[in-house]
Image: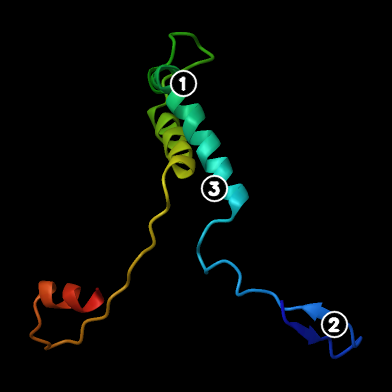
Amino acid sequence: MSEIQNKQTGDNLPRRGPGRPKGSPNKVTIEFRETVRTLLEGNAENVSRWLTLVAEGDGSESAKPNPAKALEILSSLAEYATPKLSRVEGHITPGDTKSHEEWLRELK
């Protein structure tokens, strides 16, 4: 490994590689997501039952039906089991005659 000299201290330091590409998850994130995914897959029947219980309630005063909360829970669980998608923003000049397909081909 080549070395570079630290300008302030004069120490020789090993040259580091370029690192992880921007946007790629680190090892801990990958392992955590895999653990959550495995947990959800192994308990799919229970998770489904729990979400139904939250959405429909159990008939008691303390567990009223709350479909919005069930959807919120499902959404937060999905964050860990699926990759997040990034938004793509496009700007089209008024009066341009290109079709949607032509614009999409240019994005690729």
Q: Residue furthest top?
A: 59
Other residues around mark 2 within 10 Å, as few (<14) / some (14–19) / many (≥20): few
Q: What x and y, as percent, mark residue 29?
A: 58, 49
Tags 2 and 1 in contact by the CB under 8 Å rule? Answer: no
Dot 1: element? loop
> Relative to residue 44, is residue 2 drawn left or right?
right
Q: Position of residue 60 (x, y in %)?
A: 48, 8
Q: Residue 35 is drawn in which quadrant?
A: top right
Q: Quadrant of the N terminus?
A: bottom right
- 24 up-or-down from 3: above or below: above
Q: Nearer the viewer, mark 2 or mark 1?
A: 2
Q: Residues within 10 Å of mark 1 (few under 14, many from 20)?
A: few
Q: Amino acid at mark 3?
A: Ile
Q: Secondary structure at mark 2?
A: strand
Q: Give the residue pinned by disc 2.
A: 12
The residue under the point 46% across, 44% down is 79
Mark 3 or mark 2: whose residue is earlier in sequence: 2
Residue 30: numbered disc = 3
Q: Amino acid under label 1?
A: Asn
Front residue (pair 49, 37): 37
Q: Position of residue 73 (x, y in %)?
A: 47, 33
Name the residue nearer the viewer: 36 or 90.
Answer: 36
Q: CA distance from mark 3 to mark 2?
A: 34 Å
Name the residue rendered at 40%, 34% in the picture.
71
Residue type, label 2: Asn
Relative height, residue 102 to residue 41 (above, below): below
Residue at the (50%, 64%) spot, across then down:
23
